[in-house]
Amino acid sequence: MNDEEGGHGLAIGELVERTGVGESTLRMWERRHSFPRPERLPRGHRRYRERDAELVLRVIREREAGLSLHAAIARARDFDAEVEPSIFAGLHRRRPELQPIRMRKPVLLALTHAIEDESCARAERPVLIGSFQAERFYRQSERRWREFGRMAELAVVFANFRHLSMPADRPVEVPVDRARPLAREWAVVCEAPGHGVCLAAMEVAQARRQRDARREFDVVWSVEPALVRAAVEISLKLAQKTTPELSERIAERLSARMPGQPAGDQLRLAAAITTRTLGQLG
């Protein structure tokens, strides 16, 4: 097959393979809803983005949750257009009623370690995401995160790295421009089949001139599965925007069914993390 016939992106047969949605259904969606919208090659062949597979799978999930096809496609389009500036900003926009708690760095560090340790102890092959602001802060925790990376299905860290790094047995290191809001953010997100937790903290601007231990952050954290999934989606979309090389792995992860978690389990997880945090502060 020559380049003109092959083109870039996914052929419709590959999209069918990735999503399980039949070719006739995809053509019907395109005809009636202009979704997904493929590129047309000179000979008329359709070519889809890697992201289109993720969006089609998202429509399927929304349909399974009870939405009409029209509403499910509308949500997928919103998701496609929306890239939050940071994890904290995205969570705050989705849940403005979540009041941030002001914490100094030592308390935030204890809570972060408690979340990491509890997630690790459960050994459930999680997706792990960390936002470290500066590379030097990540290097201080790199030994811990290398261990996490070996146990995780996917581990991604953000900081002002000079270069993208995608080692096979360690977290993917995604560089963040200093001018972006994400560069001021401290975050840890974990989603696994049996549990999930997210924390996002934005440094208080005037506190940045303080001594390290006196730096202050506005912090939100939650074990609610829907909010954890939102944090995963925001994080991976940020990584995907910066790092197209991750697109396929990210699309696979975002297409996974959101884990269910009874309210009692959520309370036990929150209690376990709180207990670990108090133990570290004590």
Image: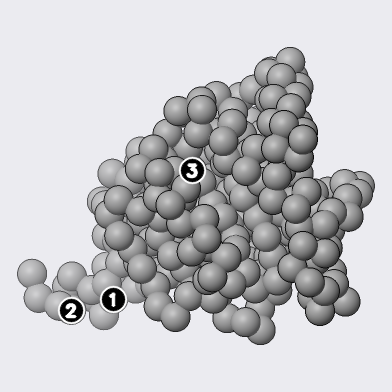
Quote the CA–CA distance across marks 3 and 2: 38 Å
Quote the CA–CA distance across marks 1 and 2: 7 Å
Q: Quadrant of the N terminus?
A: bottom left
User: In the image, is residue 73 above or below residue 177?
Assistant: above
Disc 3 element? strand
Q: Which residue is mark 2?
A: 4
Residue 45 % position (x, y): 27, 68
* Quadrant in which residue 268 is drawn: top right
Residue drawn at x 9%, y 75% is 2
Report whether residue 236 is seen.
Answer: no
- Is there a contact, CB below 8 Å, between mark 1 and mark 2? yes
User: Label 3 is placed on what type of residue?
Assistant: Val
Q: Which residue is mark 3?
A: 127
The foreground one among 208 and 123 is 208
* Quadrant in which residue 152 is drawn: top left
> In front: mark 1 or mark 3?
3
Residue 216 % position (x, y): 83, 63
Specify the farthest residue to the bottom.
Answer: 179
Q: Which residue is mark 1?
A: 41
Residue drawn at x 74%, y 68% is 212
Residue drawn at x 60%, y 60% is 131
